[in-house]
Image (spheres, rainbow, N blue to C red):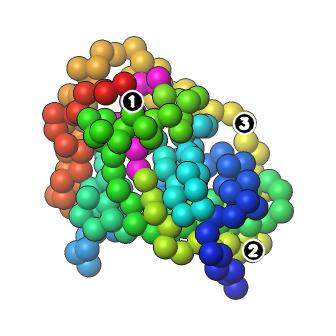
Amino acid sequence: MATVHEGIGHRLRKFIEEQVVFFVGTAPLDGDGHVNISAKGTKGSLAVLDEHTVAYLDFTGSSAESIAHLRENGRITLMWCSFTAKPNVVRVHGRGETVFRDDPRWDGLIGYFPDVTGLPGARAIVVVHAERVSDSCGYSVPFMEYRGERDLLVEYFGRREEGFHADYVERKNAVSIDGLPAMPVPLPPRSS
């Protein structure tokens, strides 16, 4: 049985910050649309801003489903699982908003990610305003060993010009698989 919390208190914040991977769930309003679950995990790309707000730096990928769903309806769930220590699963259900690189809030938010600020491929910051925070046992989550970060995304976009990144986003991230607007194109330039 899940325990619902008033917010992301010290214990939950510590747990969230210790996890090396988290999952993002979103869905379109259309009942025939595709529900999306994305794994996230670049170290330093998640920040707990306060007891009711979490943000993550979103990197370019093969699609932009979460961004499209947030632009359409704002519904989002984040989930963290313990794979190593005491079993636990934490979920934050809330409303998300996407801050693109040309948004005036970008400069203030990017400072929450000092370890990854300069990495190539960053396309947006997702800010999640928690409406429900809960944790549950996680008894059936298996033990898994963390072996390190993958550097493939950094290498891929790092050896290319920003123009390649903008073209990639326009070709692969402008609309969702259900045809919803995702990334604004052309890709907004970096403001910092």
Give the x, y percent position of residue 157.
39, 23
Label 1, label 2: how many angstroms apart (C-alpha)?
35 Å
In the image, is residue 164 above or below residue 16?
above
What's the magenta region? 118-126
Going by the numbered disc 3, the residue's amino acid type is Arg
In the image, is residue 87 above or below residue 62?
below
Q: Are marks 3 and 2 in contact (CB under 8 Å)?
A: no
Give the x, y percent position of residue 59.
41, 38
Going by the numbered disc 1, the residue's amino acid type is Gly
Q: Looking at this view, is 51 or 184 the one in front?
A: 51
What residue sits right under mark 3 in the picture?
A: 147
Q: Residue at x 35, y 56 (%)?
A: 97
Q: Which residue is drawn at 70% across and 75% down?
A: 136
Q: Can residue 46 be spotted in the picture?
A: yes
Question: Could you tell me which secondary element the residue under label 3 belongs to?
Answer: loop
Label 3, label 1: how many angstroms apart (C-alpha)?
23 Å
Quadrant of the image containing the C terminus: top left
Q: Can residue 65 be spotted in the picture?
A: no
Disc nearest the viewer among 3 and 2: 2
Question: Residue 124 colored magenta?
Answer: yes
Question: Could you tell me which secondary element the residue under label 2 belongs to?
Answer: loop
Q: Dot 2, how many residues are within 10 Å of its Cα: few (below 14), some (14-19), or many (20+)?
A: some
Label 3, label 2: how many angstroms apart (C-alpha)?
25 Å
Which mark, residue 121? 1
Q: Residue at x 26, y 58 (%)?
A: 71
